[in-house]
Image (tube, helix red, strand yellow):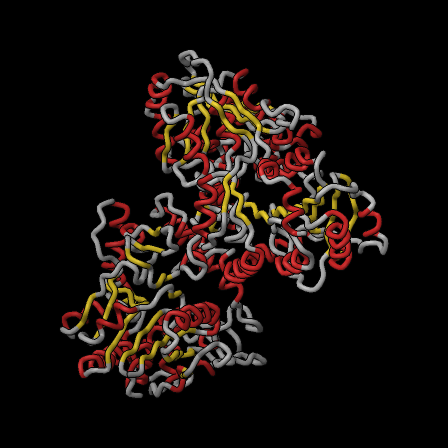
Amino acid sequence: MRTAFFTSASFAYLDRARVLFQTLRVAHPDWEIWMCMVDEEPAGFVFDPEADGIDHLVWARDLGIPNFLSWAFQHDVVELCTAVKGAMLCRILDEGIGKVIYLDPDIAVFSPLAEAVDLLDRHSIVLTPHQIDPDTDRAAIMDNEIGSLKYGIFNLGFVAVANTGEGRRFAEWWRDRLLDFCFDDVPGGLFTDQKWCNHVPVFFPSTAILRHKGYNVASWNLSQRKLTINSDGDILSGGDVLRFYHFTKVTHVGMIMIERYSEGETAIFELVKWYKDTLRRHVVEGLPPRWWKYGIYDSGQPISREDRLAHRAAIGAKHAALNPFASEGSLAPA
Amino acid sequence: MSNEYELCTVREYFDKKYYLSMYPDVVLHEVEPVFHYCEYGWREGRNPSADFDTTFYLERYDDIRAAGINPFYHYIVAGKSEGRVARDRSGALKHRLAHARPQREVVKDWMIEVIPPANDAEEKAAALLIEGRPTVVSVSHDDYRVNFGGVQNVIADEQGELSDEVNYIHLSPAQPLPKLSDEIDDFIFSVRINSAEAGRLDLDQSQRLLSRVVASQGAPRWIIHHLMGHSPEILTRLIGSQPSGKIFFWAHDFFAACESYALLRNDIAYCAGPPPDSMACGICVHGRERGEHMARIRGLLDTLSPTIVAPSRAALRVWERTTGCHFESVVVNPGELFVSAGEPRPEPRLPLRVGFIGTRSFHKGWVSFEDLALDLAGDRRYCFYAFSSEAEGAHGSQIEHVSVRVTPENRNAMVDALLIHGIDVVVSWSIWPETYCFTVHEAIAAGAFIVARFGEGNVGDAIKQFASDCSVELSCDADLNHLFKSGKLVTIVRDSPRRYGALVPSMGTADLIDTNPMAELSEEVA
């Protein structure tokens, strides 16, 4: 049975995706690597998917999303890179592939994801919660548990789906919701593709919740999963062997959060150093600074949040431009 | 411009001694150091004392940086009561981690101009050989007469012990490196014969010199002290080019298991030498090189089948486990052997005098000791001392620096210094398993109570053997701090039967050579 893995990203995240591909290839040399590129090549820049180890590249514009440019325009980069995930999942399942695993590009895989693959023999969907164990410290509760109430119980940096009837129903439901409502609008009850999945265990009963502490380790669950390295050289997360780490926000702010929960262990800092060093070795040469094709008008002018919201409202009112990128600039009312 | 009130406030907490020792250039400004700090120092990222980190404070607290005020002044008048943190307890560790690099990247800092050997270099070297003596060829990473350290001491002692009996040829790489050399075709050795400089020889010249030795004096005995900077392939070829006597291979450290010879993962944590394809090696700056590094040294060991010489049983244990090699082995003491026979020490009085011995390096545990001293500043139960070479200099007011130089002529200098200063407790806190720890033996000989980090090296064995009732082993910095802060240390030191002792020198590999006379060796080969 074929197993596929996919991610979605813009060129600015290609360095991260390269690290993901490389580490995944070591853990699962037999998996097909699929990527949805949510971007366009800038002039003079040539993307060579094969050199990056990508078996199947799908451009977001080729996913068959109606009025793609108009649809894309309403999203910022995080929103758009997540909004394509459902459609991409459907595309891969349509190929007849038996098991499909999605990972965010800022993840690195450290050992085979055997538990997730095994669960797909008995379940159609596998999700990993942000937290598995309740926190007790008030600051940790505010950081983590309340964070999950705002942004979603499950972290959609990972999802695994079997090509079953229910797996396909989930993929199509998720695709449809994301095409209409994949926005970072926490006060409005939405957080991109992620918060939708609070519904998943209810709507799709064969969903498995993966509780292995080596999956999706990140700043939001470090308080309950001490990272250690034993004398055999295994990296452990809360006692389980680390499967993959989600390197969200390894910037200054993220590091303060990580530091808060490191409890004097060095492993997390070593892991972050390894990731940053590895990223430097995979830098995307020749990409203009801050490049994202769908973040600028054809004129080169940046698209503001106000412009996106104005266009979103125009779509709702059914009078939106088919190619807003071609307009002269600000769409927002003065 | 700092105002008078700010200056007065800061002056009370400012550590002038620390400031001048860390920033000797301040003297040139001919202003009061505290004024220098308030006016310029904090803007230049200098620290007013060992327990306030200016850069950390400004990076951590954006509001203070944005306000452009003296961060130390802010900490004193407001930050401390607001619960702000004065320094990053793991700052030294993070700094070290941030700068950890594979040795391949460090090499460029080591490059020197190596002048090729002269055509008559071999003749000149041969002239230093004394007729009629058997030969010992020793190999190590640098010139033992120029550089100072544990391995160099062992070689110097060994050469000294054998100086009346053998021709002692020493080979080091003319281009020292922090890793194995990539050379596989040719190599330039820096040579000493009977302790005199014998210039540089390339591989051909070295082989011809050896063939002369073999022809006139029989096969040489080899002692490989260290392979750093060498090419195992070249060395294997050189040794194999002529008949050789017994070959010894020293486990002074764990370089045979990893280019990080102390087995420090990312230069900050002891890794215990897991398999090279382990997850830990995967995230270590030294991990990518490890498989090839081990294979190259393994090639030399398998070809030469040397006798492994370890400076302690603990060293041999760890060496065999981490290299996966099991050859004929022997354990010797490289330097002093402790003999316990002294008088009891009188009961200690407060404050307990707590010492740290040796180089203030991270892997020796200096950072933990310094943190401990800073945390206990003002605690009248303890005072802290650091015993090291003069070059290390003073280090703030919390730790008194005592300059000590141990020389071949005065091997007891450290023990004497500990006694003169009445040191009650020595913190032996190396994060790696030292193969032979001179300092813990010196501390035991001085009758000090030992507070050691639990580990699998020689320290644990030494205290079990010589100071089982005058020592405590702990596993982490938190336990160390608790032992001091709780006052438990004072009680257990008072109750411990500490005794003065003595150190007796040993002769390293020379001991082995004495027990296997060279004549016998020459006969074996003949």
Foreground residue, B463 or B96?
B463
- The residue shown at (48%, 45%) is B59
List x then y, in percent, for residue A154.
Answer: 25, 64
Foreground residue, A321 or A210?
A210
List x then y, in percent, for residue B180.
Answer: 61, 56
List x then y, in percent, for residue B434.
Answer: 49, 39
Instruction: Note whether residue B141 is visible.
Output: no
Instruction: Note whether residue A53 is visible.
Output: yes
Give the vertical position of B81 relative to A176 (above or below). Answer: above
- Residue B201 in the figure: left or right of residue B347: right
Give the vertical position of A148 relative to A324 (above or below). Answer: above
Foreground residue, A256 or A129?
A129
- The residue shown at (60%, 25%) is B411
Count of marks, rendered view? 0
Give the vertical position of B340 relative to A319 (above or below). Answer: above
Question: In which quadrant is the C terminus of chain A drawn?
Answer: bottom left
Foreground residue, B323 or A304?
B323
Furthest toward the right, the residue is: B120
List x then y, in percent, for residue B355.
Answer: 49, 25
- The residue shown at (49%, 28%) is B441
Question: In which quadrant is the N terminus of chain A drawn?
Answer: bottom left
Write down the quadrant of residue A243 in the picture. bottom left
